[in-house]
Image: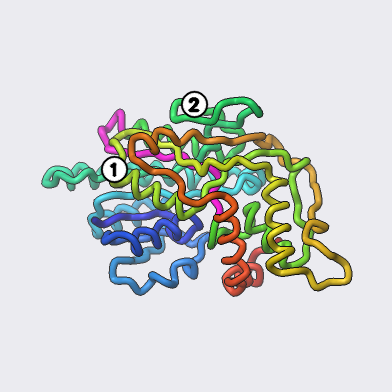
Amino acid sequence: MKVIVTGGAGFIGSNLIRHIINNTEASVINIDKLTYASNLNSLKDISKNSRYKFKKACITDKKAIQDIIFEEKPDAIMNLAAESHVDRSIDNPNIFLETNILGTYNLLDCWLQYYKVASKDSNKRFIFHHISTDEVYGDLESNDPPFTELSRYDPSSPYSASKASSDHLVRSWSRTFGLPILLTNCSNNYGPYHFPEKLIPHTIISALELQNIPIFGDGSQRRDWLFVEDHADALWTVLKEGKINETYNIGGGYEMTNLNVVEKICTYLDKAKPIVSKEFKSYHELISFVDDRPGHDFRYAINYSKIKDELGWAPKKTFNDGLGLTIEWYLNNEAWWREILDSHYEL
């Protein structure tokens, strides 16, 4: 099996590619524009593998994408290419609309043209697998039941609105043009190789640098946390076994407030790497509360019973185990994140 992964140099994409190369016999073509959040160093360990190939291209470049698809003749495409940081979407919505909406349209159009030709002489499924987020559903109150695949779309930010739009495009290409699709919506991912702007890596690195750890509002916002390697396993399970034209929610089953997450990290680091400083005795002292984000969603929670009941998938890592593995990875891979800080990113 040959699979195109778009956005494969990003956080989830790189973990997915490593999962495919290390656990299957499939071949992968990684298409990535190499934006600020992309990092080919995340794929160093499999970059020489004969079943892996990298192509630098932007999903908004229709000719480049079409050329790659028709040249490589893949069996499936897994679309993870996206702008994904909510704060950046508030500051500059334009790039989110271009990448997440127009980019998805280009992929769909190119894949449809390829599907019309390739499916004539083959019984393969030729799946367009679109990877999305639970943020398209909006947010929940404290006592609301978790999101299901039938939850109403109610996005809050330019980011989630652009992802909701891309979801609608994918479904419309299935209904109107008969394109076989799969769609997955996941909860908050965490784990190794996560870009430092996100909550968990930002907290870990800020703590190690003895800088303030900012928390929006009072930190009571709740998220369902999914270990990225579990997510990669779920994505591959859906691609191989999912029912055509279905949506599957993928969750970690561990809801926690942002403040609780940050406090857990500080407590772990206090034991794993005690502070050597006259100014601070504990990483907890670095926690600072800042003005809340505009339109900040209060709570996300995922009901993943459909993928569990139909495909037999469930997350393997508890949050505490996954968080410990994640913190240890950042402690042991300072060169990876130090290069990011030294080149173009400030905490």
Q: CA distance from mark 1 to mark 2?
A: 23 Å
**Observer-nearest of 345 and 228:** 228
* Residue 100 image point, x, y percent: 48, 44
**Which of the 4 image quarters holds residue 168?**
top left
Between marks 1 and 2 in the image, the one whose residue lies nearer the viewer: 1
Can residue 70 be seen here? The reply is: no
Image: magenta residue range: 174-190
Which residue carries the number 1 mark? 241
First in sequence: mark 1 or mark 2? 2
Asked if labels 2 and 1 touch by Cβ distance under 8 angstroms, the answer is no
Q: Is 6 located above or below residue 104 in the figure?
A: below
**Which of the 4 image quarters holds residue 269?**
bottom right
Which residue carries the number 2 mark? 151
Q: With 11 as the anchor, is 85 left or right in this view? A: right
**Observer-nearest of 303 and 169:** 303
The secondary structure type at the circle numbered 1 is helix
The secondary structure type at the circle numbered 2 is loop
Q: Quadrant of the C terminus?
A: bottom right
- Amino acid type assigned to the residue bearing label 1 in the image: Glu
